[in-house]
Amino acid sequence: MNVRLEVFYRSYYKNIYYWSNQAFGNELYVETIKKYGNNFWNYDTYIACVEGYSQTFVACDNYVDLNLYFNQYDKERTQTKAYFIDDLSQFPVDDKSIILFFDKQNHKFIKMKN
């Protein structure tokens, strides 16, 4: 009986206030540092965002400073090359870029390029 209750409560974790922030951070780690390892620091990372509120994609003002996030993994770097961009024309076309969209409903990143 206890297991069934635990499964029930865990199914609602995504509705907890900070769950979306935690899911964003977990997925960002998986799609960047875990996937590329030390080579990640050679890439520019761009995360597409939308202005204002969106049910589907992350808003630009939800997560302001990506440097704070990435500095916990490599404190020697003074500046991480990770940016939020709301205009698709600003995305670079080179091979040293990672372009991601974050799907808030599924708590997953959609990789657009690299």
Image: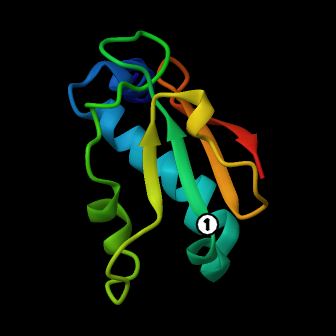
Image height of 20 relative to 43, above or below: above
Q: Which residue occupies 51% across, 30% down?
A: 107
Q: Residues within 10 Å of mark 1 (few under 14, many from 20)?
A: few
Q: Is residue 34 above or below residue 83?
A: below
Q: For this rendering, which residue is in front, 46 or 31?
A: 46
| Left or right relative to 97: residue 66 | left
Q: Position of residue 96 (x, y in %)?
A: 71, 64
User: What residue sits right under mark 1 in the picture?
Assistant: 34
Which of 77/6 is in front?
Answer: 77
Query: Looking at this rendering, what residue extends furthest in the left direction?
Result: 17
Residue at image point 42% right, 42% down = 84
Foreground pick, 2 / 87: 87
Q: Where's residue 58, x and y in %?
A: 42, 26
Q: Amino acid at mark 1?
A: Lys
Rendered image quadrant of residue 13: top left
Residue 2 vertical placement versus 27 (above, below): above
Q: Residue furthest bottom?
A: 76
Q: Does 111 sit left or right of 7 as displayed?
A: right
Res 7 → quadrant: top left
Q: Secondary structure at mark 1?
A: helix
To which quarter of the image does residue 41 belong?
bottom right
> Residue 12: x, y in percent?
36, 18
State the residue at coordinates (47%, 65%). Answer: 81
**Residue 71 x %, y %:** 32, 73
How many numbered circles are shown? 1
Task: Please determine whether, in this image, residue 111 is positioned above or below residue 26.
Answer: above
Quadrant into which the N terminus falls: top left
